[in-house]
Each structure stands twice: as structure tokens, then as C-alpha cells.
Amino acid sequence: MSLLFPAPEPVLAPTSDGHLFPVRRLFCIGRNYAAHAREMGMDPDREAPFYFTKWAEAVVPSGTTICYPPLTSNLHYEAELVVAIGRGGRNIDPAQALSHVYGYATGLDMTRRDLQFEARDKGRPWDTGKNFEQAAPLGLIHPASETGHPTAGSIRLTVNGEVRQDGDLAEMIWPVADIIAYVSQAYRLEPGDLIYTGTPAGVGPVTPEDEIVVSIAGLSDTRITIGPRAES
Ligand code: MN
């Protein structure tokens, strides 16, 4: 039997020690920093964790110039700590959850905010607001054996050198172990899964030619330039 057309290339994310991490799925936690939940008009005290998903092919490496996507006039950055799962499991015990982590990276949950808000306000899915080509830039993945499991430390984003987000990982409402346990109740987590853990306050728009840099203490930066509008 022959392939009808070429199978998609695997998405391979480089690690800080020279390996390639095959990306499987993306889970993205919403409103995981209280100040950001408030800036989205929500009450951070009343919410259980929730998440949405993106395709693996939304991942692009640091250094990419990404197209300004179609159908939006309000493309936003969201700086996030990304957890790379190295060992699968279902119904993972929070006390064991960190043993499923391969490593950590900086990343961006790029968002068509106008489409996300329209969907949110109409009770529709968030897909078009969150999941689109090049919507999940990712820095080098650092093995946890090198970095440990960060629970505090600076998470910061600049646009053209100006600080726009300046938070601390300690502000996360749901820590990494709880997030892994929670997601694994609905899906068997698999090696290659990435979890984007939510963004601190200060999200905002970018326009073509802007340069975005995400920095988290102890990890490599994610550096992205916004290119021209995508061809329709
Ligand atoms: Mn996000």
C-alpha cells in the first residue's frame, strides 16, 4: 500500500542539550494568574482549572518570523511557562506528577483576541481565537534534570525592548503538578505532550515588525518577530 500523499512531518522541538523532542499535543491552561484573570474580566477565585488545545503544528521555534494571521485585527501575545511531558499516564497523582515531566521551556500562546472574545461571549468554542498556524512559539526545552522543577522566578515579556508582562511563576493559581493531574483525568497524557501553563497580567496587541521576547529565570528565551499579514 502506498501513501496517497506525503504524511506530515513530525514536529520536533530542540532541547538545550542537543536532542529533539517530538511534539504530540498541546494543552493550554486558561486564566492561571489572578491578575490576568481580572484583566480578562473574570473572577479568579471562582474557577476550577480549564484548558483548550492547539495542534502540534502550531509550534514554531524561537527565532521565527511568524505571519500576522488572517481574520484578526487584535493579535495578542501571552508569555507562558511550557511543561514538556516525557512519561505518559492517566489519573496521575499530584504527588507523582512531576516525575512525568521531561523538561521546561518558555513559550507564547498567541491569540486572536477579537475572535476569542467573540466566541467566549457567544458561548462558542475558542478554536479560531487560539489555534492557528504558528500560534505556539516555543523556546529550547531544558531537561528538568538540569533545571529542577521551577515553582518561582521571573516570567517577563518585552515588545521591542519594552516590558509588557512582568510576573512570577509563584503567582500561578494551579501549580504544574496539579495541572498535570487535572489534564490526565480527561486524557491519557503521552510523551511529547506540551502544557502551556497560562500567562501573567499585561497581555496586549502586536503589529507587523514587532519583536517579542519571553524570558523565564533559568530557561532560554523565546524570541519572535511579527511578519506581514498572511496571504488569504
Ligand atoms: Mn494562555
Image (tube, rainbow, N blue to C red):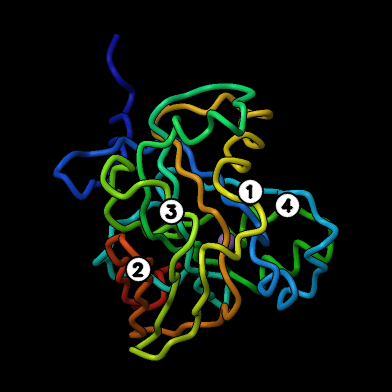
Earlier-in-chain disc, 1 versus 4: 1
Q: Which image quadrant is residue 37 in?
A: bottom right
The residue tagged 1 is 52
Question: Element under label 2?
Answer: strand
Please report the residue visible at 36 percent of the width from the left and 54 percent of the height from the top: 105
The residue tagged 3 is 150
Q: Is residue 230 above or below residue 93?
A: below
Q: Position of residue 184 (x, y in %)?
A: 61, 30
Please report the residue visible at 36 percent of the width from the left and 36 percent of the height from the top: 102
How far apart marks 1 and 4 lie (CA) works out to 9 Å
Q: Position of residue 121 (x, y in %)?
A: 82, 66
Q: Is residue 8 above or below residue 205?
A: above
Q: Quadrant of ligand 1?
A: bottom right
Category of crowding for the residue at label 4, using alpha-carbon neighbours closer than 10 angstroms: few (below 14), some (14–19), many (at least 20): few
Kindly report which numbered mark, 2 or 3, lies closer to the viewer in this rendering.
3
Category of crowding for the residue at label 3, using alpha-carbon neighbours closer than 10 angstroms: few (below 14), some (14–19), many (at least 20): some
Earlier-in-chain disc, 2 versus 3: 2
How far apart marks 4 and 3 lie (CA) works out to 32 Å
Please report the residue visible at 55 percent of the width from the left and 46 percent of the height from the top: 176
State the count of labels. Answer: 4
Earlier-in-chain disc, 4 versus 2: 2
Instruction: Describe residue 202's horizontal placement relative to residue 153 as left or right.
Output: right
The residue tagged 2 is 66
Question: Element under label 3?
Answer: loop
